[in-house]
Structures are given as C-alpha cells and as structure tokens.
C-alpha cells in the first residue's frame, strides 16, 4: 500500500472512531503496516476494498480501532519531566500523603504500554526518593487497552533501546541482563498492578495522588472526547494531586479544578 493511500484512508476513517489525524501524522507507519497486514489476511487488494469491507461488516470498526493504537514508549521518556517528578512533584505529594497519615502514594499510569512509564516512576521512587520517605510506600495501577502490552509489561523485559534513556547507574541497579534483554528486578515490579482497561470505557474507582496520561488521549482523540476524558481523569486525582500529560500535548479546554504546576513539562495540580 502506498503511503498516500494509507493517509487518505486514515483521514477518512479516524474521525469515525473519534480519533484525530494530526496525532497520527508522524507515527502513521505503525498503523499503515498493520492495515496492510489486515488487508492481506482478508485477501483484499486496496484500501478502497477495505472501506467497502468496513461498510459491509460494521464489526470490523472495532478491529480498526485496535489497529489504531500507537504503541511507542520508553523508560525515562522526557528527561525534564522525569527530573521534575523526582525533584518537585513526588516529594510534594509524599509530604502531603504523610501529613494525611497515608501509608502509600497512589499512582495511575493510563495507556502504560509495556510498563515503561509506571516502572519509570517506581525506579525514580525507589532509587531517588525512598530513603527520604522510608515509611511511605508506592502503589501503581497501570492500565492499557491492549492485552498484549499488559502481558509484556508484567514480564518486564526490554531491549536496550527502551531503557537507554535511564540514568546509567539506575539502569545497572534495577535491571538484570537476560541475553540481549534488560529485565526489571522483581523489587521494582512489585508495586505495580497491571490491568487491561480501555480508558474510554472504564477507570479505576479509587483516587490517585498522581495520574500520568501521556501520549494517548491528548494526542490521538478528538477534542470533544479529550474534554470528556479530562473531566473524568481530573475526577480521579486527589485534591492537591497531579495530572501529567505528554510533553507535546495540550489540554483541550479551560482548566477546571486544575492549575499549572509546570507548563514546560505539562504537569497540573488539582486545586479543588
Ligand atoms: C503511545 S503509547 C504511550 C505510552 C506511555 N504513556 C508513554 O507516554 O510513553 C499509547 C498506549 O496507550 C494504549 N492505548 C491506546 N488506546 C487506549 C485506550 N483506549 N485505553 C487504554 N489504553 C490505550 C496503547 O495500547 C499504547 O500502549
């Protein structure tokens, strides 16, 4: 399939799934490749044939929705954000949790891919902050709509490319080598619970000190859906807690119940 055919198809199809084309522009190769494989498995020749197939088989939209999930992540993605988390956000949330008498900080990673994001928070906590807050634990809930990502996250083994942004001394402490893979030691996996969950359909019922929703809702979803989800995400952040979005993302609407904690690294604090 030629790139321009795939682009034309995506520009037609994505809005029907409440997804926005500009979010996919730079990362479309992954989706186009899956589309090509789907066409082959259905013995269809062109995207026009596939368009016809979608019309004749509406249940295929669900397959297309699954094929449209971009799965790119890495540990310590956006160094400045990670540093800000370590130096400002987590210590402040930890103080707050302790003054409430809580025993642990609660974190939710939305669209957690293979665990790179929640495990980054676990590593920052254990290697950067735990000694300052020895009596405070960490509980991370990490959700992804793709069961395959969740299976890989639970296993916790990665190629070098996924872990190379981590500060070297942390990488050496937190991982063991298994052949070419870097496998996260059990102690760093222990605080994270993974669940298959589509953020459009469900959210954990508890309240969190920190919610990371990066490179998903505010990149790929249409504005109306972004606004709706922002309201629901804000709802599960505790007062005084933080919401982190992707470094290239913007929140869709007027901030309601949130104030900017750092514009540069896209962190917001819940005020009420
Ligand atoms: C681009 S990755 C971002 C990973 C990580 N948050 C980061 O910033 O590095 C997006 C992840 O969201 C997941 N995802 C896509 N649609 C989802 C949905 N509706 N609900 C939950 N997860 C979803 C994908 O499977 C993928 O793992």
Image: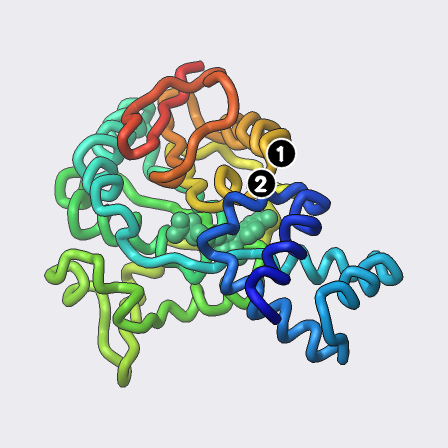
Establish if 68 lies above or below 109: below
**Viewed as shown, does residue 112 lie left or right of 68?**
left
Q: Quadrant of residue 260?
A: top left
**Residue at 27 percent of width and 81 percent of height:** 180
Q: Which residue is mark 1?
A: 225
| 56 and 260: which is toward the camera | 56
Decide if residue 215 is in sight here: yes
Q: Quadrant of residue 67?
A: bottom right
Q: Which residue is mark 2?
A: 221
**Image quadrant where one finds the N terminus:** bottom right
Residue 170, percent from left and from top = 16, 59
Decide if residue 195 is in sight here: no
Q: Residues within 10 Å of mark 2 (few under 14, many from 20)?
A: many
Residue at the farthest right position: 56
**Viewed as shown, does residue 58 lie left or right of 2?**
right
**Image quadrant where one finds the C terminus:** top left
**Residue at 22 percent of width and 58 percent of height:** 165
Residue 230, percent from left and from top = 53, 29
**Residue at 51 percent of width and 26 percent of height:** 252
Marks 1/2: CA–CA distance: 6 Å
Residue at the farthest bottom position: 179
Label 2 secondary element: loop
**Viewed as shown, does residue 254 lie left or right of 140?**
right
Label 1 secondary element: helix
Establish if 252 lies above or below 37: above
Residue at the farthest left position: 169
Residue 255, percent from left and from top = 46, 18
**Residue at 34 percent of width and 39 percent of height:** 247
């Amino acid at each position: 399939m030629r790139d321009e055919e795939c682009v034309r198809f995506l520009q037609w199809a994505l809005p029907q799934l409440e997804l926005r084309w500009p979010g996919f522009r730079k990362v479309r190769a992954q989706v186009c490749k899956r589309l090509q494989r789907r066409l082959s498995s259905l013995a269809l020749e062109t995207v026009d044939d596939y368009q016809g197939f979608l019309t004749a088989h509406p249940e295929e939209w669900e397959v297309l929705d699954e094929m449209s999930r971009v799965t790119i992540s890495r540990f310590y993605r956006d160094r400045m954000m990670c540093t800000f988390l370590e130096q400002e956000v987590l210590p402040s949330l930890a103080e707050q949790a302790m003054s409430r008498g809580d025993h642990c900080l609660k974190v939710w990673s939305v669209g957690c891919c293979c665990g790179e994001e929640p495990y980054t928070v676990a590593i920052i906590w254990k290697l950067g902050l735990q000694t300052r807050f020895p009596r405070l634990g960490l509980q991370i809930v990490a959700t992804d709509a793709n069961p395959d990502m969740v299976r890989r996250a639970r296993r916790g083994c990665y190629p070098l490319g996924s872990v190379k942004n981590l500060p070297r001394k942390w990488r050496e402490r937190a991982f063991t080598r298994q052949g070419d893979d870097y496998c996260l030691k059990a102690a760093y996996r222990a605080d994270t619970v993974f669940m298959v969950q589509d953020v459009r359909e469900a959210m954990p019922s508890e309240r969190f000190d920190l919610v990371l929703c990066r490179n998903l809702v505010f990149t790929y979803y249409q504005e109306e859906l972004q606004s709706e989800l922002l309201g629901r995400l804000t709802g599960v952040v505790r007062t005084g807690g933080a919401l982190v979005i992707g470094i290239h993302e913007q929140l869709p609407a007027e901030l309601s119940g949130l104030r900017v904690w750092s514009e540069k690294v896209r962190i917001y604090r819940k005020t009420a």
